Amino acid sequence: ALYKSFGGFAADVVAAIDQAAQDGVDIISLSITPNRRPPGIATFFNPIDMALLSAVKAGIFVVQAAGNTGPSPKSMSSFSPWIFTVGAAAHDRTYSNSLVLGNNVTITGVGLARKYAIIL
């Protein structure tokens, strides 16, 4: 489903969540994130969070990206306690690495650490 910043609507996301629940999925993972604190004391009264609450009540594990608009610099936002929130970070480091295959072919690329080799 596409969210409003990509040409869709919140109703599209709600429909996708409902359909996923009907299809019997075990996990729903959303890349959309809160971009600001909702007004009022009931921060979760929006259609997407309510649909996700229904999914959780149906036994579906829900994971959502954390927003980058927390209360202070370099902090994040998450407002619905039934949603498992995941934060990510970026850095400016790159590591050249290579994979060594079982037939001694080496594939050079970029990795997550300074040195590693995988023998297949």
Image: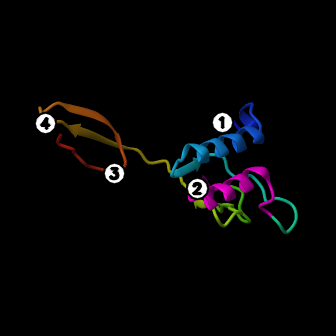
| Residue 93 sits above or below residue 106 on the image | below
- Which residue sits furthest left? 103
CA–CA distance in space, label 1 to label 2: 16 Å
Q: Amino acid at mark 1?
A: Ala
Residue 60 lies in the magenta stretch = yes
Residue 97 lies in the magenta stretch = no
User: Could you say whether the residue bearing mark 4 is in a helix, strand or loop?
Assistant: loop
Rendering quarter of residue 89 = bottom right
Rendering quarter of residue 118 = top left
Q: Are marks 4 and 3 in contact (CB under 8 Å)?
A: no
Which range of residues does the magenta coloring cover? 43-66
Q: Amino acid at mark 3?
A: Ala
Q: Residues within 10 Å of mark 2 (few under 14, many from 20)?
A: some
Residue in the image at 74% along x and 56% along y: 50
Mark before the other along the chain sequence, 4 or 1? 1
Mark before the other along the chain sequence, 3 or 1? 1
Front residue (pair 19, 116): 19
CA–CA distance in space, label 2 to label 3: 30 Å
Q: Residues within 10 Å of mark 4 (few under 14, many from 20)?
A: few
Q: Which residue is mark 4?
A: 102
Mark before the other along the chain sequence, 2 or 4? 2
User: Could you say whether the residue bearing mark 1 is in a helix, strand or loop?
Assistant: loop
Front residue (pair 6, 14): 14
| Residue 88 sits above or below residue 12 on the image | below
Q: Amino acid at mark 4?
A: Gly
Front residue (pair 111, 4): 4
Q: Which residue is mark 3?
A: 113
CA–CA distance in space, label 3 to label 1: 34 Å
Q: Which residue is mark 1?
A: 1
Q: Amino acid at mark 2?
A: Val
